[in-house]
Amino acid sequence: MREEGWVKVYVAQGLTEAYIVKGLLEFNGIPVDLDYEAVGPLLGITMDGLGEVRVLVPREWEKKAIKLIQEEAPREDSSENP
């Protein structure tokens, strides 16, 4: 991790997903940093860990961040079709 005292609260599969989570957390006043390998976005690859983006927050915000992500994350079992 880049900064001491920051913890991973989410792993996104690409920058688009990471920026959505980052926006949610920042909107709620939580500082956020993204950690990723530069080659993933460059090549647009998101397989075998390449393209993963780790969403980091200061340790003191960890519980609140995880709760927000869990509350706002789309549910896999939900469907738009009845």
Image: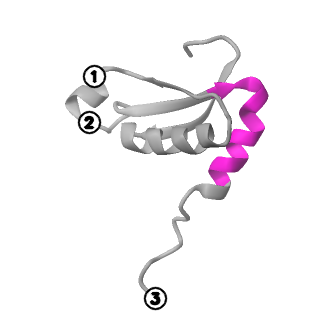
Picture residue at 35% right of the left edge, 35% below the top: 48
Residue 36 in view of the camera:
yes
Secondary element under disc 2, as helix, strand or loop, is: loop
Percent position (x, y) of residue 11? 51, 37
Mark 1 and mark 2 residues within 8 Å of each other at the beta carbon: yes
Please rate how many residues cluster around mark 2, counting C-alpha atoms within 10 Å: few if below 14, some from 14 to 19, many from 20. Answer: some
Report, in whole angstroms, how far the alpha carbon at label 2 lies from the one at label 3: 33 Å
Q: Main secondary structure of the magenta part?
A: helix
Q: Which residues are magenta?
A: 57-70
Q: Residue 65's image quarter?
A: top right
> What mark, if any, has residue 48 been given in the picture?
none
Q: Residue at x 78, y 27 (%)?
A: 60
50 drawn magenta: no
- Tell me, yes or no, if residue 14 can be seen here: no
Mark sitting on residue 82? 3
Residue type at the position of mark 1: Val
Query: Please, is residue 14 above or below residue 8 in the view?
Result: below
Residue under numbered circle 2: 45
- Is 60 within the magenta? yes
Dividing the image into 4 quarters, which one contains the N terminus?
A: top right
Q: CA distance from mark 1 to mark 2?
A: 8 Å
Q: Position of residue 32 (x, y in %)?
A: 59, 29
- Which of the two discs, 1 and 2, labels the residue nearer the N terminus? 1
Q: Picture coordinates of residue 76 (x, y %)? A: 51, 65
- Which is nearer the N-term, disc 2 or disc 3? 2
